[in-house]
């Protein structure tokens, strides 16, 4: 296993690698110089856990590159709620914190008692996107980061000179993958911390001439409902979609829009436990199979197994298992866990349900997103898709303890009475009235994903 990582090692020093609204175009030579300044400030004599804030700024990015190339481990902070940041600090106890261009030493190096050591291959700890309560992070190696960055670049066909906007937090696996894959593929980054849901983001994208943007399915849905078009953004050439289930009709609409400007759409699937990406669907395959999440990334393999871990026939639903060089070392819930080596052996049981057909992977929900109503097993993710189309708005299907299902949605639902829900209940073989509408503000995690744990707590509290 490698014990450091230089993401700029293959780059020509004259290439533009970063574009910043304040500093303009920054070539590789200047970014390397900034990185090396940070290397001097983060001594390499002892492996450190370095917390880095604002990684989508030029200082934060340079510090990130410096820490990896010096053999340190990184804990990124970029948009997480303050309570999670504080809790993560308490649990993992970083040795140093980089913020606003300065290094704060969290404790005197060499102080006794010494913190538990870090494994030589540990490059990063990254919170899982669904984390709530006590922090749990995945332990990623330098090899994990490099393998997945290269695999994404190959699978999506990132070309030299392609410029990606940093549209998602870098402490979220999807956001981090955009940064790493464009650095290793001779692409460049348009630095911004604005969200694609804001008008300011699209103004910055135009000013920085970004050609690629990563979007969550919920963001795609919102933009399409507003009449978004790539024609309004002349530099746009690629949309990357990941971070949840996207409706096949929305995939087809995105393809039609991007094809009209000669652009690309890549629908992707992954988990933090796999560094980021597990599979990628190219646009040609997406036209024929918009409900698929694509083929495993280069170097990876997907299989589908039953509850006992045995293989199932092609086309049968089971749990998706992924094997590849980007599978995490393991989980961490304490500082002492950061000294552990590889506990997964490059094999990951994803907890996702799906099936394989002609080499393409299809997802049908989560193992833990199932419930029973009067003995009938209901896959809540599939039910949500149907409810979303019927109500014309974002929906969360959450089970009540009494074997009914809350259909939570924000204002603006097109259905004005219960007839649509009754029809859906009939199709699913459920009693009429077991789908109970509840209008509410749908909470989200800082990554932008819907926060099911929070809604479950709210519903349970309301029942008491």
Image (spheres, rainbow, N blue to C red):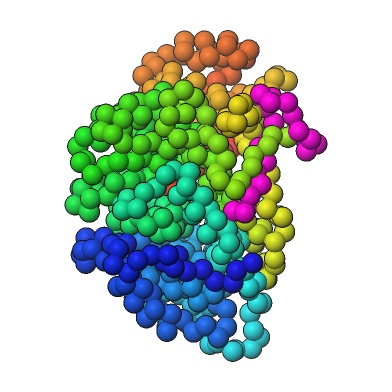
User: Residue 408's spot in the image, x, y percent?
Assistant: 48, 30
Q: Quadrant of residue 99?
A: bottom left
Please say whether residue 29 is one of the residues in the magenta stretch. no
Camera sees residue 459: no
Q: Residue shown at 38%/70% (left/top)?
A: 62
> In screen coordinates, is 371 left or right of 221?
right
Q: Quadrant of residue 93?
A: bottom right
The residue nearer to you, when weighing 429 against 200, is 200
Camera sees residue 422: yes
Over which residues does the magenta segment extend?
306-327
* 398 is higher (above) or lower (below) than 72: above
User: Residue 107's spot in the image, x, y percent?
Assistant: 53, 83
- Name the quadrant of the C terminus: top right
Please say whether residue 308 is one of the residues in the magenta stretch. yes
Q: Residue shown at 57%/83% (left/top)?
A: 46
User: Residue 389's spot in the image, x, y percent?
Assistant: 43, 21
Q: Residue shown at 33%/46% (left/top)?
A: 212
The residue nearer to you, when weighing 411 against 243, is 243
- Name the quadrant of the N terminus: bottom right
* 19 is higher (above) or lower (below) than 442: below
* 213 is higher (above) or lower (below) than 35: above
């Amino acid at each position: 296993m490698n014990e450091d990582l230089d993401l700029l090692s293959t780059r020509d020093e004259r290439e533009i690698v970063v574009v910043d609204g304040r500093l303009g175009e920054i070539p590789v030579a200047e970014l390397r110089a900034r990185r090396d300044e940070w290397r001097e400030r983060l001594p390499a004599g002892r492996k450190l856990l370095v917390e880095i804030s604002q990684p989508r700024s030029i200082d934060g990015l340079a510090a990130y590159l410096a820490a990896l190339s010096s053999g340190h481990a990184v804990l990124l902070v970029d948009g997480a709620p303050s309570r999670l940041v504080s809790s993560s600090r308490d649990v993992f106890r970083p040795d140093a914190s980089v913020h606003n261009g300065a290094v704060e030493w969290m404790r005197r190096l060499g102080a006794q008692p010494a913190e538990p050591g870090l494994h030589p291959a540990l490059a990063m700890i990254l919170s899982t996107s669904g984390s709530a309560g006590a922090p749990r992070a995945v332990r990623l190696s330098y090899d994990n980061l490099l393998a997945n960055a290269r695999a994404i670049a190959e699978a999506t066909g990132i070309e030299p000179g392609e410029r990606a906007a940093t549209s998602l937090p870098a402490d979220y696996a999807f956001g981090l993958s955009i940064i790493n894959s464009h650095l290793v593929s001779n692409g460049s980054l348009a630095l911004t911390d604005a969200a694609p849901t804001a008008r300011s983001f699209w103004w910055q994208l135009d000013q920085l001439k970004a050609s690629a943007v990563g979007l969550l399915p919920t963001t795609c849905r919102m933009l399409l409902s507003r009449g978004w078009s790539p024609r309004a953004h002349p530099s746009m050439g690629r949309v990357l979609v990941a971070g949840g289930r996207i409706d096949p009709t929305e995939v087809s609409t995105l393809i039609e829009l991007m094809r009209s400007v000669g652009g690309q759409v890549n629908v992707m699937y992954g988990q933090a436990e796999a560094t980021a990406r597990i599979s990628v669907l190219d646009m040609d395959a997406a036209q024929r199979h918009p409900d698929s999440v694509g083929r495993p990334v280069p170097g990876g393999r997907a299989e589908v197994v039953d509850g006992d871990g045995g293989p199932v026939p092609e086309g049968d639903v089971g749990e998706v298992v992924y094997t590849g060089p980007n599978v995490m070392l393991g989980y961490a819930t304490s500082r002492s866990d950061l000294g552990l080596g590889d506990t997964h052996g490059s094999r990951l049981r994803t907890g996702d349900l799906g099936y394989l057909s002609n080499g393409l992977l299809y997802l049908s929900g989560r193992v833990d997103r199932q419930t029973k109503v009067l003995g009938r097993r209901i896959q809540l993710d599939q039910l949500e898709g149907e409810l979303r189309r019927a109500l014309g708005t974002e929906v969360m299907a959450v089970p009540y303890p009494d074997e009914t299902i809350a259909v939570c949605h924000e204002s603006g639902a097109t259905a004005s009475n219960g007839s649509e829900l009754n029809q859906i209940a009939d199709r699913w073989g459920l009693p009429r009235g077991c789908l109970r509408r509840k209008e509410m503000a749908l909470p989200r995690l800082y990554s932008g994903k819907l926060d099911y744990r929070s809604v479950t707590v709210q519903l349970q509290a309301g029942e008491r």
